[in-house]
Image (cartoon, helix red, strand yellow):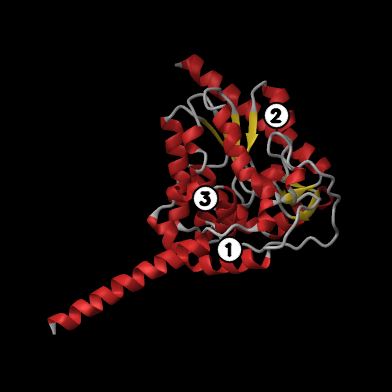
Amino acid sequence: MKRFLIRIAITAVLTGVMVVIASTVMLLRKDQLSYYSHERNVALAYDRLQALKDTNKIVIIAGSSAGFSINSRMIERAFHMPVVNTGTHGGIGTRMQFELYSDLLREGDIVIFCPEYGTKKKTLYGETTLLRILSTHMPEAYSKFSLAQWLFQFKNIGIHCRDAHEHRKAEAFDGPYSEKALNEYGDIEWERPHQDTISYYGMSSEMDEDLLAFYQYIHSNTQERGIHLLFLPPTFMKGNFEQNAEHISWLANCLKQNGIPWQAEPSAYAFDDSLYYDTPYHMTPEGTVKRTEVLISDLQKYLRSLNTTDKHE
């Protein structure tokens, strides 16, 4: 009996080792389509922040609603500080959007944090997109995964490997989703006219507790380190915004009740449908300017409030 149990244990260990090796090989496969896409901004943003790690700067953390809908050049001119737009894809997940760059932030930096409206577990830990982007552009960032994130993402490893295989012959391409569209800040800088067939997003009024806790962590972590955090709602197409008004109001109240309210009204970032390109988060160049003007105004108000607080102290 003892010998039998030992054999079972050895078989289990060997099977586990084989699963780990196979999963690692599949996980680290590069995706050629991602390699030539704007998703390269994940690594480029890291390099920019590395070069600026001893300099105060403005850092934008979000998904593609930042990459496709913010004009960083306008922000730099308004505040005379270098700007780095890390916004690449909501599928990266909020946790890694922050953890990828957290070590490169310093006291006095300004972080503009405007996550998209998702409220489920995948909003925190990401989708297959995260594996595609990290495996292709920053595999060393896997060291930042928590155990919970590994458990959540394990099911996506095979999907990533399949997609990478399908994209193995991808070549460089043009357009707003290409690496060629990225400017020196991390913005998408490519002509993208409004499309009349933008699909609306539906939303669920159910907040994942771990996601909420991570939002609270970002607030406390930046405060402890002397980093200024401007927590804003994302830009969102007005028609879709009105369709989800009840959900957005619920989310605003949820954040407020947990001590991390948005520092602006969500409706201020809902613009006419004609100012959006191909999703309710991706704006045309004209829309990007309007959104950035509102963002600059909110940042100015925030910085004035800081100065007022300092004087009273």
Could you tell me if residue 257 is visible in this image? no
- Marks 2 and 3, how far apart at CA: 31 Å
As drawn, the residue found furthest toward the top would be 311
Marks 3 and 1, the one that precedes in the sequence: 3
Give the left or right position of residue 52, taking residue 274 as reference.
left
Amino acid marked by disc 1: Ser
The residue under the point 59% across, 48% down is: 137
Which element is circle 2 on?
Answer: helix
* In the image, residue 150 above or below residue 285: below
Please identify, in this view, whether the residue under mark 2 or under mark 3 is nearer the observer. 3
Residue ID at (46%, 27%) = 226
Q: Residue 126: x and y, percent?
A: 54, 57
Residue that numbered label 2 is attached to: 75
Residue pointed to by mark 3: 139
Residues at marks 3 and 1, CA–CA distance in whole angstroms: 33 Å
Q: Secondary structure at mark 1?
A: loop
Is any atom of residue 109 visible in this view?
A: yes
Residue type for callout 3: Pro
Q: Quadrant of residue 41?
A: top right
Closest to the observer: 132 or 209?
132
Tag count: 3
Q: On the image, numbered disc 1 is attached to which residue?
A: 204
